Image (spheres, coloured by chain):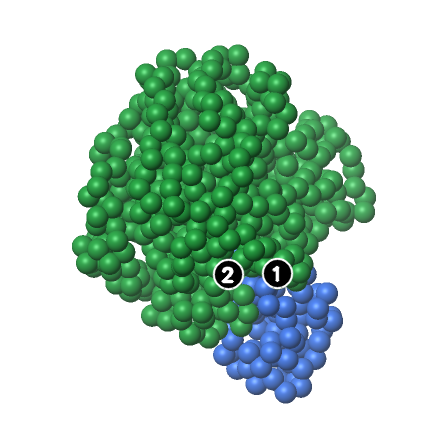
Amino acid sequence: MSIGATWGKILHVDLTTSKIWVENPPDELYLKLVGGRALEAYLLLRDLPVGADPLGPDNLLIFAPGVFQGTNLPGAGRHSVGGKSPLTGAIGSAEAGGWWGHEFKRAGWDALVVHGQAPAPVYLWINDDKVEIRPAGHLWGRDVADVENAIRAELNEPRLRVAQCGIAGENLVLMANVINDYNRAAGRNGLGAVMGSKKLKAVAVRGTKNVPVVDRKRLTDLSKWLGENYKTLAAWAHEKGTPGGLTGLNRASALPTRNFQDPNFPDAESIGWETLHTSILIGRDTCQACPIECKQVVSYNGEEFPDSPAFKTQVKDEVKIDKVYGGPEYETLGSFGSTCGVNDIVAVSKANEYSARWGLDPISTGMTIAFVMECAERGLLTAEMTGGFLPRWGSSKDMLTAVEMIAHRRGFGDKMALGTKRLAQWIGNGAEQYLVEVKGQELPMHEPRLKAALGVGYAVAPVGADHMMNIHDTGYAAPGGGLDRVNAVYTVGPLPPSDLSTEKMTLFYYEVNWQHFQDCAISCMFYPYNYIQLAEALSAMTGHEYTPLDILAVGERAQQLCRLFNLREGFTEKDDRLPKRVMKAFQSGPLAGIEITEEALYNARQTWYGLMGWTPEGVPTQERLAKLGLTELLETK
Amino acid sequence: MVTVEAGGSLRAQIPSKTILSNAETVGDAIQQLRLPADVALIIMVNGRIAHWTTRLNDGDVIQLLPTIGGG
């Protein structure tokens, strides 16, 4: 292959037949798609039969790093996992931090595509060019850390890295994640269940090859700039990580509380960073080649914290927390905390530990528990329906019990494991009106009534409601960061967070393409890189020149391919919607009276469809596909 | 005169209850504060969500809360 930082080799493994083969894609594929999500969407369009069962043998599970992996670019300690989502039936594409992606790329592969279903549990051992399918019956049913340690011992290779499905994935829980490096997750979309359905317990990798970067000096300059500036330009991530924003969001009515019902969580301080920092936080963790160290690590063994005024726990004597599973992010603090009305940092952190230990998506799991709490409170769920389990708002024990029931599909957990949309259908009696999901995927912990274009992003994201392939309007409320970045291609000044004007949607168009680009080349979105810098990095690595508009076109290609996939699976523009609950104004608090009307959502969506070159029905036009160079790519199957 | 209250990590940059005497809009006030470039802001005036062009009246209280965009 003549493109730097790629190998020209995609590894295919069919677990039904044990056949292993190598695909050598044309250069064109990597020049246009760059890897990650765009590559996943392309392969799914090409190789997955229309209407395939996401948990059947036809589905593909794709592990895809991008051009950036294996190069030591700071922020590139990531990879993507794709497939058809069993939670939504739409495309699934999820990214994880850690070391696995770096190691896999250094083994000499651009992607791994898993086909079929093994008759009994197996794991893959990829040791540079050597690929083995090995029995995993002895690993099935074991916790994540236990499995990773066992594989490392069994193969006698301390430097290998492991990605795996947890117990939740084995049990086909529709909100199961793929876990790597003990506590990192390719989260959302239920891809852990796809892995479990294939009886693929794990993929262990060891890579010793140097990724061939064409012009390393150009990269060195960028790394040097980052080293000199990350402490100021990514200060929020460096100092407090994602938990740092929780109490501020609560003051603005934007911390989702009790299934997005309330404008305020009175006990937000008890699950905020200040409490975390003065109680159970014991250190930081990071990803490959990352100096920022945004990950919080916690541990608990029954201590009390008199110097932490807002610390409280209901499970002091029942719960211990193992530091190997890391610590809670903002999403987890919200989903198991305020969203369930739980003010207990120990219980929330334990639920986070369970999520990594068993391979659950904390967002969908917490939101499902909150939905069950609401349905129980409203009398829609009865003890007869749930086997006696009726969780209550604010109960740490009920919340933790629900997590355990979901992961193991124990009792009513068998129903909760299907996520809120299917659960509402099963409950009936109008339970659907309390759903807070898009395309079957539960909302993350960001409030559309504060961030209106984020709400549009929830509606149109190909994977269902997602906060990362999206913009956060508050990042464009004042000069600096986000505006500086987009001003490289589009001149615009500060815009109100509630604004859905053509200006805002044009900014949204460019910035969402940027986010998708970062999931193709694969770079951490917490890095302060701009369009010009990553265009420079991609050019330096590949030896082919990319402008800022060229890299944004890569992100747009990913979105166009995802859209084509979803359309052929039966999705329409009617699925690009928002749950009514988050469109209706709060009656009190800083956001009182701020609503998103159906008309405003429709108009914003239509503006964006137009910018994407889609018809008013949300269908990509042949002209735009041709302009992006996708027509010939899709024809050369 | 308007008062600025900062939350979270902005407290390190903006002293408690900073008084500004000649800010006509929120944008004027924020520019005078010279905030770090990476901060995503929730802006409130007198407890209500506001924005860059919101006009200020004597005695208004501006609250600036750093926020996040991921996690």
- Name the image quarter holding residue A547: bottom left
On the question of residue A300 being in view, the answer is yes
Q: Residue at 42% across / 39% down in the picture? A: A7
Question: What is the crowding at mark 2: few (fewer than 14 residues within 10 Å), some, or many (at least 20)?
Answer: some
The amino acid marked with disc number 2 is Gln
Which one of the lettered chains is coloured blue? Answer: B
The amino acid marked with disc number 1 is Trp
Q: Which percent across, then down, holds residue A615?
A: 20, 58
Find out whether the residues at labels 2 and 1 contact each other: C-beta distance under 8 Å.
Answer: yes
A432 left or right of A447 in image: left
Q: Residue at 47% across / 15% down in the picture? A: A134
Q: Residue at 66% across / 53% down in the picture? A: A238
Q: Which mark is residue A533?
A: 2
Which one of the lettered chains is coloured green? Answer: A
- Name the image quarter holding residue A63: top left
Q: Which percent across, then down, holds residue A165?
A: 48, 26
